[in-house]
């Protein structure tokens, strides 16, 4: 195999590896953002639940 072909293969492999690493980073970043958003939504729902319980008339009033 000539050096030109080997260089092209090496360059292609480097691009594939870089793309795979970028995708893994993006996926990890998205997973972290999702986890943070999920936690914030859970906190908001818990706050709303507390507010509803506090503002609801007690049974028998």
Image (cartoon, rainbow, N blue to C red):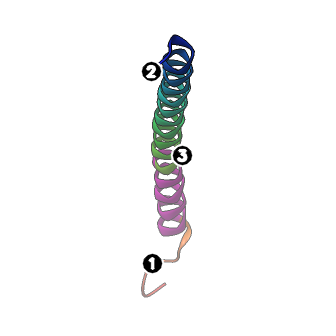
User: Hey, which quadrant is residue 8 in on the image?
Assistant: top right
Residue at 55% across, 26% down: 12
Residue with the mark numbered 3: 37
The disc label shown at residue 58, or none? 1
Look at the numbered disc 1 and give the secondary structure of its residue: loop
- In three-dimensional space, the C-alpha distance between marks 1 and 2, rounded to whole angstroms, equals 84 Å
Element at label 2: loop
The residue at 49%/84% (across/down) is 61
Q: Secondary structure at mark 3?
A: helix
* C-alpha span from label 1 to label 3: 33 Å
Q: Position of residue 1 (x, y in %)?
A: 44, 20
Asked which quadrant contains residue 22, the reply is: top right
Q: Which mark is residue 35?
A: none
Give the labeled residue for mark 2: 1
x and y percentages locating residue 55 in the rendered image = 56, 67
Q: Around disc 2, counting alpha carbons within 10 Å, would you say few (fewer than 14), some (14 to 19), or many (20 or more)? A: few
50 versus 4 height, above or below: below
Q: Are marks 1 and 2 in contact (CB under 8 Å)?
A: no
Residue occupying the point 53% across, 74% down: 56
* Relative depth, front residue between 56 and 29: 29
- On screen, residue 54 above or below 17: below
Q: Earlier in the sequence, mark 1 or mark 3?
A: 3
Between discs 3 and 2, the one toward the N terminus: 2
Residue 30 location (% of width, % of height): 53, 41
């Amino acid at each position: 195999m000539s050096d030109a072909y080997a260089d092209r293969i090496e360059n292609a492999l480097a691009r594939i590896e870089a793309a795979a690493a970028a995708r893994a980073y993006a996926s990890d970043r998205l997973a972290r953002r999702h986890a943070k958003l999920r936690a914030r939504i859970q906190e908001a729902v818990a706050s709303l639940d507390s507010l509803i319980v506090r503002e609801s008339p007690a049974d028998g009033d």
